Image: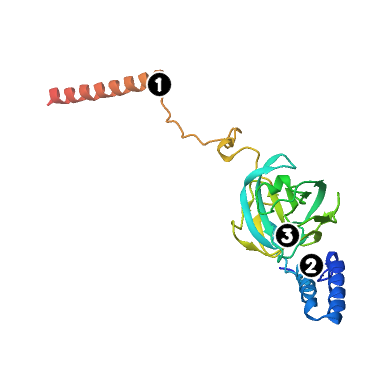
């Protein structure tokens, strides 16, 4: 893991106006009536915790897809990526008002497109929030060509989506690229060969939790069952053949047999002659 230099304040800049107004109002009301100032101090404390943006340790595994935010996993399923129009592994994270709402890049990659869509402000915990709520999508590609989409989705209370990245920009994992104010959701769409490392109901920590493992290279287009058979090497090879026994030709065989017969006959005649002389 690596703890990078922190390029932004621990209290997100988006919260400075709210914190300043809350603090000023708290001080003024306290001067008039201490008890009446209590709600103003509570608001100031809430703003401080909501806009906090602490530094986090970042896993450097090359195949790791990191959680872009803090929150609770509400979806892990195969679904349609509405921006790329392809089937994908969808992982959604719901953030309540007590989670860190700063969004960080889940990968090292280059931004292909940034698409903003106006919409409703339904409860971000609902599935239809992904397609009906106000949202902003970042389409990015890794150095090895893997395509990933991560979407900021506004919620019931959230009314402001902020995105600071743009087309052709290179994002580093853990790099801050956006913010959503007051409760929201982030959807991450991954290629189907990605393997989820979280389940529904899991609590995740922004950039420290690994959402999924994504192979660096895309698999073959054809499914495993349709893969072509292994090609047989058609180059002729020299194979040693067993030596054939040497068989004499028919003419040679006849000559050998005749010589044997004549020799045997000669021996018979000699034996008969010896017997007569005896």
Numbered disc in front, either 1 or 3: 3
Query: Label 3, on which residue?
Result: 183
Count of picture labels: 3
Q: What percent of the width, then of the height, locates residue 214?
A: 67, 52
Please identify the residue farthest to the left as the structure is shown. 278
Q: What percent of the width, then of the height, locates residue 152?
A: 76, 53
| Disc 2 from disc 1: Cα separation | 110 Å
Q: Earlier in the sequence, mark 2 or mark 1?
A: 2
Q: Which mark is residue 26?
A: none
- Residue at 87% in and 77% down: 28
Disc 3 element: loop
Q: What percent of the width, then of the height, locates residue 186?
A: 72, 54
Horizontal side of 126 relative to 244 (left or right) equals right
Query: Label 2, on which residue?
Result: 51
Q: What percent of the width, then of the height, locates residue 254?
A: 36, 19
Query: Label 1, on which residue?
Result: 252
Residue 31, placed above or below residue 217: below
Determine the image quadrant of residue 250: top left
Count residues near mark 1 (Cα–Cα under 10 Å), then give few for <14, some for 14-19, many for 20+.
few
Q: Earlier in the sequence, mark 1 or mark 3?
A: 3
Q: Earlier in the sequence, mark 2 or mark 3?
A: 2
Count residues near mark 2 (Cα–Cα under 10 Å), then give few for <14, some for 14-19, many for 20+.
many
| Disc 1 from disc 3: Cα separation | 106 Å
Foreground residue among 41 and 139 = 41
Query: In the rendered structure, are the residues bearing label 1 and label 3 in contact, judged by CB atoms less than 8 Å apart?
Result: no
């Amino acid at each position: 893991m690596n703890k990078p230099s922190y390029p932004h304040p621990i209290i997100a800049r988006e919260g400075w106006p709210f914190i300043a107004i809350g603090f000023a109002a708290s001080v003024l009301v306290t001067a008039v009536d201490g008890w009446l100032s209590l709600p103003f101090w509570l608001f100031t404390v809430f703003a401080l915790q909501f806009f906090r943006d602490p530094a986090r340790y970042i896993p450097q595994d090359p195949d790791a897809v990191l959680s872009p935010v803090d929150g609770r996993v509400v979806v892990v399923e195969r679904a349609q990526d509405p921006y790329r129009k392809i089937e994908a592994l969808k992982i959604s994270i719901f953030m309540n008002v007590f989670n860190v709402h700063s969004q960080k890049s889940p990968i090292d990659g280059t931004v292909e497109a940034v698409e903003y869509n106006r919409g409703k402000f339904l409860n971000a915990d609902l599935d239809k929030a992904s397609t009906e709520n106000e949202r902003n999508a970042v389409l990015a590609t890794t150095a090895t060509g893997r395509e990933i989409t991560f979407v900021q989705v506004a919620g019931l209370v959230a009314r402001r989506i902020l995105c600071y990245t743009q087309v052709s920009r290179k994002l580093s994992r853990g790099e801050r690229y956006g913010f959503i104010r007051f409760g929201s959701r982030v959807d991450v769409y991954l290629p189907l060969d990605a393997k989820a490392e979280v389940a529904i109901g899991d609590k995740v920590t922004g950039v420290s939790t690994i959402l999924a493992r994504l192979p660096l290279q895309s698999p073959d287009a054809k499914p495993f069952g349709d893969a072509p058979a292994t090609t047989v090497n058609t180059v002729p090879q020299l194979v040693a053949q067993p030596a054939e026994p040497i068989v004499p030709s028919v003419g040679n065989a006849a000559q050998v047999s005749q010589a044997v017969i004549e020799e045997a006959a000669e021996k018979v005649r000699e034996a008969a002659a010896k017997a007569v002389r005896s």
